[in-house]
């Protein structure tokens, strides 16, 4: 065996050992890329849920407003009947009583519609809180992935460890959504 061949074998062995020491880094990067993708999809779905719940809340507030307007119209008609002099007092009294009953129903309906709208708004806030956690998790996982990739360029493991710190923060943020989800479910 010549000296050149021995040197080549030595260099090849060193290169192989460097590759094997970087395999965990490459695997970590692959895993982080998958976690970023999953977190991104979950975040997008949660944002969509928030938008849909906001649409329901808006529709409910519109329904509330329509009933509130009807209630106001009924109150105005009742007031008008109360001040207008009619020839048939018994008929006027009967119509006025009908308006009062109708007004009581409208007042109850308006209150129920307001409660429904506020419940939808609470769901919007819950979905937005979950979406924010997913967004933070996604950002931290992406930062962790980028910092970890610097390890391949520098061959310094400090970047791998630092990337893992960001990744753990991202995972914790994404997993914390479960506590918001179950915490909200238990509270209701």
Image (tube, grey):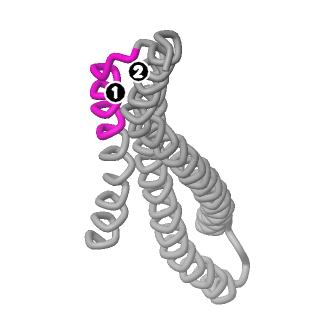
Q: What residue occupies the far front of the structure in this picture?
A: 1
Instruction: Considering the whole magenta stretch, tell me its main secondary structure.
Output: helix
Relative to 165, say whether 73 is above or below. Answer: below
Label 1 Cα crowd, 10 Å radius (few <14 / some 14-19 / many 20+): many
Residue under pointer 2: 151
Q: Secondary structure at mark 1?
A: helix
Q: Are marks 1 and 2 in contact (CB under 8 Å)?
A: yes
Q: Name the residue rendered at 36%, 32% in the picture.
A: 21
Q: Which circle marks residue 188 in the picture?
A: none
Q: Nearer the viewer, residue 126 or 179?
A: 179
Q: Residue furthest right?
A: 87
Residue 101's spot in the image, x, y percent? 55, 83
State yes or no: residue 26 in magenta.
no
- Report the Cα–Cα distance between label 1 and label 2: 6 Å
Task: Report whether 68 appears left or right of 178.
Answer: right
Q: Position of residue 81 (x, y in %)?
A: 65, 68
Q: Seen in the image, is 26 located left or right of residue 173?
A: right
Quarter of the image with the C terminus in it: bottom left
Image point 47% across, 23% down: which residue? 9
Location of residue 8 in the rendering, given as x and y in whole percent from the top left corner: 51, 17
Q: Residue at x 40, y 22 (%)?
A: 14
Q: Quadrant of residue 83?
A: bottom right
Residue at 32% from the left image edge and 64% from the top image edge = 184
Q: Is residue 134 visible?
A: yes
Q: Is residue 158 left or right of residue 11?
A: left
Magenta extent: 155-169
Which residue is denoted by mark 1 in the rendering?
160
């Amino acid at each position: 065996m010549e000296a050149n061949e021995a040197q080549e074998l030595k260099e090849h062995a060193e290169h192989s050992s460097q590759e094997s020491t970087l395999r965990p880094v490459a695997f970590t990067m692959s895993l982080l890329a998958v976690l970023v993708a999953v977190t991104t999809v979950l975040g997008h779905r949660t944002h969509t849920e928030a938008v849909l719940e906001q649409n329901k809340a808006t529709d409910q507030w519109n329904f509330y407003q329509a009933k509130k307007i009807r209630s106001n119209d009924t109150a105005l008609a009742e007031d008008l009947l109360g001040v207008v002099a009619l020839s048939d007092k018994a008929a006027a009294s009967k119509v006025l009583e009908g308006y009062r009953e109708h007004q009581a129903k409208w007042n109850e309906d308006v209150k129920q519609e307001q409660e429904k709208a506020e419940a939808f708004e609470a769901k919007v806030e819950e979905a937005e809180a979950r979406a924010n956690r997913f967004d933070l998790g996604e950002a931290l996982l992406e930062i962790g992935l980028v910092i970890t990739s610097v390890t391949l360029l520098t061959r310094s493991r400090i970047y791998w460890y630092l990337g893992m710190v960001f990744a753990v923060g991202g995972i914790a943020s994404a997993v914390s959504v479960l506590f918001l989800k179950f915490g909200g479910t238990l509270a209701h």
